Amino acid sequence: MPHDPLTECLECGLLQRNPPLPPGGVAECARCGGVLHRDRPDSLNRSLALTLAGIVLFIVANSFPFLAFEMQGQSTQTTLLTGVTDLYQGGNWFIAGVVLFTSIVAPGLQLLLLLAVLIPLSVEALPPWLPRLFRWVRHLTPWGMMDVFMLGILVSVVKLSEMATIVPGASLFAFGVLILVLAAAQAALDPDLVWSRVPVATDLSRPLRPGDDHLACGVCELVMHRASAVWVPRRFDPLWSRVPGRARSGQWHCPRCTEVLHRRKPRSLQRTWALLLAAIIFYIPANLLPIMTVTSLGRTQSDTIFSGVVFLLEHGMWPLAAVVFIASVFVPLLKLLILILLLVSVQWRWTWRPRDRTRLYRIIELIGRWSMVDIYVVTILVALLRLGNLASVQAESGAIFFCAVVILTMLAAMSFDPRLIWDALEPEHVGDRKQSISREPATL
Ligand SMILES: [Zn+2]
Ligand SMILES: [Zn+2]
């Protein structure tokens, strides 16, 4: 199988040779230990089969009720969409939008895009829109949170088990299997194999030598001379750049997947600081204000995130209390602290333990999404408890702030460029501040 001769580690920026891998083999970065590539046997066929199974399960999971709630002879049923519509009708459009996107739209779109990419590839066809769609699969992946939603269902069921009878619906099983199938489809998919089938529009035959001005694509991982990238002038060009002697502004794009290319993520430190500061400010009301009000048999009680954990502890459900505490209290705080440490260390150009700091970055990328569990619990409770004074749940403003904290810290982690950690070790390295994207290439 043809593959790119060179690869640049997206976590430390080291340019290295890309060796052909034995079946099931893994290539690790020589400097930071991050996984560069993984060989996945029979990748296209397996991921196509799993994607097809995933689409069938997705339709089933969204068509039938997944939980029924029975209390004093009255019952309600809920589908995946009920919670979203109830939140929206209750005026909580922000949470409704986030839940809709992360639990239904993103996973569904991801499955459809995968299908649209894998079917043509399996018949050796290559429609021109394929690279663009596959690029979107990559961008959507962190936002599909069905597994976190499943944990939310589990927490809700345990919370309600003392209060009423909970009957699992047909779609709950489909939902459970879907999570496994989605995980298996992602594990089976070899993105390098897909990209190796896409022809590159420009000439890449000129070999790269040390010190050459090169760019690496953050999506398809193509490494190229800057002159081989595609220069796209900005469509809405500010007037001042048309002054004679001043070049038009624009961006370099990848000739294979059309992604915008940067040596380092643009204005990474400023963006990450801004998002992080916003998250820190929102973290305070998220923990002080109640996230929901529960009415049960005429009694009304407001819960903050912390009192939710205490409730579980008081009722002897300490494993679940631990899960909710870790996901909702510990993980967001840990994420904020790690991001501050990373930003400060890059700002002051620390050379201390770059490998461990890269590892910390990997950890926050991995765990951040699990904090969404409390938002899903609120959504599920709102959808299930709709019996007026007998039993009902209202989402409160704390949930909006908490949801914003999770999204902001995820965006902050995405805008942080871990390669900056390693740039401090190379004094002559061109950092993100010096990169020039407003200069037209000499070849044009
Ligand atoms: Zn590396
Ligand atoms: Zn690319």
Image: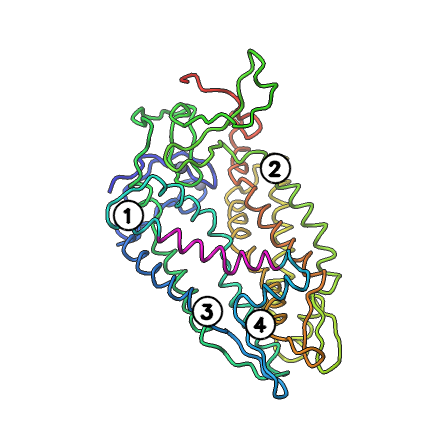
Towards the viewer: 87 or 19: 87
Label 1 – label 4 distance at C-alpha = 41 Å
Which residue corresponds to the image point at 29% horizontal and 53% vertical from the top-left? Answer: 43
Q: Nearer the viewer, mark 1 or mark 4?
A: 1
Whether pointer 2 and pointer 4 mark residues with C-beta atoms closer than 8 Å, the reply is no
Q: Does label 2 or label 4 sit earlier along the sequence?
A: 4
Q: Which mark is residue 63?
A: 3
Residue 254 occupies which quadrant of the picture?
Answer: top left
119 with respect to 339 (left or right): left
Q: Does label 3 or label 2 sit earlier along the sequence?
A: 3
Number of numbered markers: 4
Q: Amino acid at mark 1?
A: Leu
Q: Nearer the viewer, mark 2 or mark 4?
A: 4
Q: Nearer the viewer, mark 4 or mark 3?
A: 3
* Above-or-below relation of 405 to 268: below
Residue range (magenta): 96-115
Label 4 sits on a secondary structure element that is helix
Q: Does label 1 or label 4 sit earlier along the sequence?
A: 1
Q: Amino acid at mark 4?
A: Val
Q: Position of residue 407 (x, y in %)?
A: 60, 52
Ligand 1, seen in the image, is in the quarter at top left
Which residue corresponds to the image point at 36% horizontal and 58% vertical from the top-left? Answer: 185
Q: Which residue is mark 2?
A: 269
